Image (cartoon, rainbow, N blue to C red):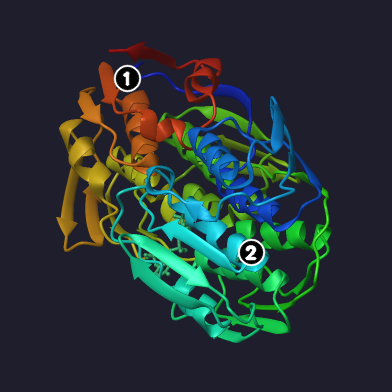
Amino acid sequence: MERLHISGGRALDGNISISGSKNACLPVLAASLLSADQIDISNLPELVDVSTMLRLIKELAGKCYELDGSALSIRAEEIQSKKAPYDLVRTMRASFLVLGPLLARCGYAEVSLPGGCAIGSRPVDQHLKGFEAMGAKIEVRDGYVIAETPEGLQGADIYFDKPTVGGTENIMMAASLASGTTNIFNAATEPEVKNLGDFLRAMGADISGHGSNQIKIKGVSHLKGCIHKVSADRIEAGTFMVAAAATRGQITMNGADPRELEAVTELLRESGAEVETSVDRIRVSMDARPRAVDIETAPFPGFPTDLQAQFMVLNAVAKGKAFVREQIFENRFMHVQELIRMGAKIELIGSNMAVVTGRKALKGAPVMATDLRASSSLVIGGLVADGETIIDRIYHIDRGYEAIEKKLSMLGASVRRIRK
Ligand code: UD1
């Protein structure tokens, strides 16, 4: 088990490059199973979740890829197994994204019900509703979703009850090889969905409207190989933006796309930070104590739920009081108890609202990471706090942040990884 030791109280200062996006590359890796041709992917981040997806691909299609640093060549010539086992799917919910490609390519799939971050029950009913509308027969048995399409997948009109990123992606992949046209209504509009649509188009899919809440996919008989560069991770960039402001430092994030972070930029400016942007660069600086700002998470282009925990730390050391409302996931306040251990004043009202009263300072403490984004909030807490913070269970952070301590050290932080 590894821990992070952080000696806090230093302003972060310097430049970093933003890595390839976890949430953008996982669906692209799953979609690689849709073709027997070669797909070349660059700018792949080195993350535990990416290794998990590659292990799953190996399970399904054999060792069909070569990985050279951040460059991956993948050629899923033959699907050898149609079963995504529990031990792989339980560690990462995005594994469920292989259901669409398997069903489209083989007409049969067994995929374990997902696990991943412990942030609420996170059902997959909308995915299944979509596949059923496309003619799949679905059964849930012994913790597995067993899906088959005796007559092949048929295009359909699918209305999601709520926008779901993974659900939209799963259906887009399956519909690309279905017969006829699929229309997804109330689709998720996140940049990662747009990105997957562009990737599928490069493979020869006939997709339009991706990035809006209505997507049209005309099925084709075959998808071909292509070349793809993974876009920058907007959540990693957003995390460093908040860290710059919370530590009253200045960070330039190279490679970040400011159009994907407008809601975060706006709130940081409200808190008193200076945010400068160009096409692929964001610079955040803060030279005074931040002002508290209310946050309400929402689907894109609203404030991302994946940055709620980090922003809460900024509010914890800000002047004034802020309301934080989590609207995407239930039970996404597990960082609160840990931040309270560091001296933060946070009161929970029901399961989706927190009231944060800013303190002049936080104090280092031993804390425990509970999920991916909660763990990055504890890192920011440790950077801001006086004294030493020890974060346990940092395997959560390695799922989604590439070289976190290296990047933080480059910005002047005192961070060490210790093996227990
Ligand atoms: C993706 C992201 C995750 C992010 C989330 C919301 C990846 C790998 N993960 O997760 O980082 O926090 O989007 O932006 O891209 N829901 C249902 N039924 C379903 C599917 C979802 O009720 O069938 C609910 C979920 O429980 C949640 C909400 O819909 O409350 C949004 O979930 P969804 O957009 O599907 O999130 P993920 O794709 O799992």
Q: What is the x, y in percent for residue 26? A: 58, 48
Q: Which amino acid does label 1 sit on?
A: Arg
Q: How far apart are marks 1 and 2 (CA)?
A: 43 Å
Residue at (51, 35) in percent of width and height: 240
Q: Against 173, is 376 above or below?
A: above
- Left or right of 3? Residue 229 is right
Q: What is the x, y in percent for residue 323? A: 28, 58
Label 1 element class: strand
Q: Which quarter shows the C terminus?
A: top left
Label 2 element class: helix
Q: What is the x, y in percent for residue 31? A: 66, 55
Count the marks: how many? 2
Residue wearing tag 1: 3
Residue 291 at least partly seen: no
Which is nearer the eye, 153 or 218? 153
Which is nearer the N-term, disc 1 or disc 2? 1
Quadrant of the displayed image that contains ligand 1? bottom left
Residue wearing tag 2: 106
Residue at (65, 73) in percent of width and height: 212
